[in-house]
Image (cartoon, rainbow, N blue to C red):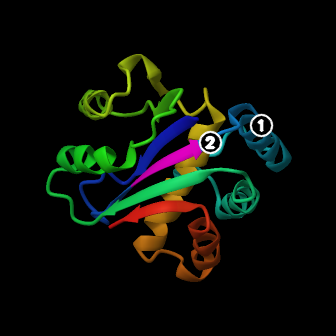
């Protein structure tokens, strides 16, 4: 089992003060990777990134990505006093699987984020060698996690409710756990 971790909104100092942390489980890594590349190629985009892509591409990417075989855990934290503490608390509840072969974490993170994640995972018995900080252009499944984090955060922040409601309801079918 491969795990992909991404978040949305943890860096914000203004605007909405909630953030979403997603933990995506994929059993058939190579098939999902190939399919994400194919979706991006069909859409004629280099790579999907929630905050950088126009809505018409987001919508088509979401439609196709939700057909893929994955499971997800989502944590939504509103008004976090200490994002680092919240991250540690949440991840300790999410990382409970025993058959993890690798954990990929979106690498555009501050050093404190990487250290917190590695500490929590070490405390859960996951070797730090299994944890890889990667850029979203290196691993397509990180872009899947980015889509889920962006969709979840936007949904819970009440952005584009009419557009996002149906997609979030489809995503809920893949949820293992939702923490608020």
Taking 41 as reference, is 99 above or below it?
A: above
Q: Is residue 104 left or right of residue 63?
A: left
Callout 2: helix, strand or loop?
A: strand
Taking 126 as reference, is 9 above or below it?
A: below
Residue 11 in view = no
Residue furthest out toward the top: 129
Examine the residues drawn in magenta and state their main secondary structure. Answer: strand
Callout 1: helix, strand or loop?
A: helix
Residue occupying image coordinates x 75% and y 58%: 67
Q: Mark 2 points at which residue?
A: 26
Residue furthest out toward the front: 98
Quarter holding the C terminus is: bottom left
Range covered by the magenta-colored residues: 21-25
The location of residue 124, given as percent across then percent down, is: 31, 34
The location of residue 177, given as percent across then percent down, is: 44, 61
Residue 156 is drawn in which quadrant?
Answer: bottom left
Residue furthest out toward the right: 42
Mark 1 Cα shell of 10 Å, populated few (<14), some (14-19), many (≥20): few
Residue occupying image coordinates x 26% and y 60%: 14
Quarter holding the N terminus is: top right
The location of residue 148, given as percent across then percent down, is: 55, 56
Residue 179 is drawn in which quadrant?
Answer: bottom left
Q: Looking at this view, is 120 or 145 the one in front? A: 120
Residue occupying image coordinates x 39% and y 43%: 96
Residue 29 in view = yes
Q: Looking at this view, is 118 or 83 the one in front? A: 118
Q: Name the residue under label 1.
A: 31
Q: How many labels does the image show?
A: 2
Q: How far apart are marks 1 and 2 (CA)?
A: 10 Å
Residue occupying image coordinates x 32% and y 50%: 93
């Amino acid at each position: 089992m491969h795990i992909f971790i991404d978040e949305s909104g943890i860096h914000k100092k203004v605007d909405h003060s909630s953030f979403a942390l997603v933990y995506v489980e994929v059993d058939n890594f190579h098939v999902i990777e190939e399919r994400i590349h194919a979706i991006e190629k069909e859409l004629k985009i280099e790579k999907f990134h929630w905050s950088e892509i126009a809505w018409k591409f987001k919508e088509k990417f979401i439609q196709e990505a939700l057909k893929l075989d994955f499971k997800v855990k989502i944590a939504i934290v509103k008004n976090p006093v200490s994002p680092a503490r919240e991250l540690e608390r949440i991840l300790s509840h999410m990382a409970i699987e025993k058959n993890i072969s690798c954990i990929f974490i979106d690498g555009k993170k501050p050093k404190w984020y990487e250290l917190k994640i590695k500490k929590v995972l070490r405390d859960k018995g996951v070797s730090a060698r299994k944890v890889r900080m990667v850029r979203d252009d290196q691993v397509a499944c990180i872009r899947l996690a980015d889509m889920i984090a962006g969709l979840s955060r936007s949904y819970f922040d009440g952005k584009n409710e009419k557009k996002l409601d149906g997609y979030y309801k489809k995503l809920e079918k893949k949820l293992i756990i939702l923490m608020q």
